[in-house]
Image: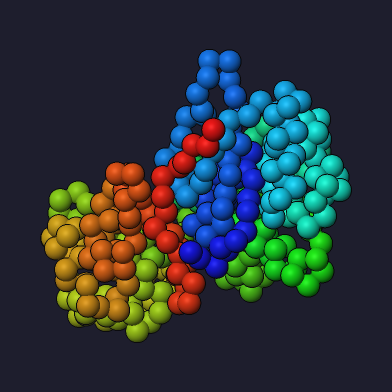
Amino acid sequence: MGPLTGVTVIEMAGLAPAPFGCMILADLGADVLRIDRRTSGGGLTPPSGPLDRGKTSIELDIKDPSDLARLLELVDGADVFVEGYRPGVAERLGLGPDVLLERNPRLVYGRMTGWGQEGPLAPRAGHDINYIALAGALEPIGRAGERPHAPLNVIGDFAGGGMLLALGVVAALHERNASGAGQVVDAAMVDGANLLMSFLHGMHAAGMWEGERGTNLLDGAAPFYDTYECADGGYVAVGCVEPQFYQQLLAVLDIDEEAEELAFQIDPSGFDKTRTLIAARFKERTRDEWGVVFADSDACVTPVLSPWEAHEHPHNVARGAFIEVDGLLQPAPAPRFSRTPTATPQPLKVQQ
């Protein structure tokens, strides 16, 4: 089930970004066969949990001519081939795009790297923090006067990496419907991180993002876009950027009268006083109590949940946003489709 039903994907086992992209393809209905490396001690590559779901795996030693021949036969009948090697490695293994596209001209060949296939850094090692640093995505994250704060590896590895790969593959499959020809999709995490900064580039060009880290409207400087500690040590997130939502925040917190003496909402000169008033109010109740208070409000206030609590929130429960696969709780496939809904992912299947 799903909009990619009937699409066959060959995935060369690797680190998280490419497997995540292929997980998305599997969630959308594609038949994903992961090629695990056969080791001398036997056994498959250790599974990575949710990134394995919906896939089938087979163990091959692609340096063995017979196993390589078997893999090439599988690619001949596939729609998509995905590898996450450093540039040049697939070619040395006999699995480069020239070889595979000659055998299967309709093949969409997905390449997932950190730095891309060319450029001075292309052959170098790196991780999420390096890619987002060079993309200008790391520098704005953090408090004023402090060093950049290393975020989770979601910007480079997953949003700018695996997600971009999946989008590129789907786009190439769509184009193939018209041309009948496959092509190479060069998905680089640094490119994806660059792309994710498009909005901030627009803000900067409009003169709306000029200050140092932690001094702008959406980076924690403004009291109406920040987090606040509650009585129990938990936190709430406040994001009432629009004036009407900001007024609701002040009303629910019962600081309307004090607010009359405050500076205009986006006037930085009043940020400290406003933040002090808001912070004092949030310290009066627990995180979950505030969650109930603001549940039916447009003040844009939500409890800050850990990843292990998110599945318990009533909104996530109502939407079925989390599922269990083989006893492991994890996020459900997204987005949702009205006519070709996705199926509940199944655990990894091992093929002999």
Question: Observer-nearest residue: 334 or 263?
Answer: 334
Residue at x-position 37% and y-position 68%: 239
Residue at x-position 50% and y-position 65%: 2
Question: Observer-nearest residue: 79 or 122?
Answer: 79
Residue at x-position 58% and y-position 44%: 33
Evaluate whether residue 166 shows in this view: yes
Residue 296 lies, in percent from the top left, at: 22, 77
Residue 332 lies, in percent from the top left, at: 39, 58
Residue at x-position 69% and y-position 51%: 78
Question: Which quadrant holds the C terminus?
Answer: top right
Image quarter for residue 69?
Answer: top right
Position of 88 compared to 326: left or right?
right
Residue 24 lies, in percent from the top left, at: 53, 55
Residue 328 lies, in percent from the top left, at: 32, 44
- In the image, residue 50 sits, relative to residue 196, either above or below, namely above
- In the image, residue 34 sits, relative to residue 278, either above or below, namely above
Image quarter for residue 315?
Answer: bottom left
Position of 248 compared to 63: left or right?
left
Image quarter for residue 342?
Answer: bottom left
Question: Observer-nearest residue: 224 or 311?
Answer: 311
Count of picture labels: 0
- Furthest residue toward top: 41
Question: Observer-nearest residue: 86 or 100?
Answer: 100
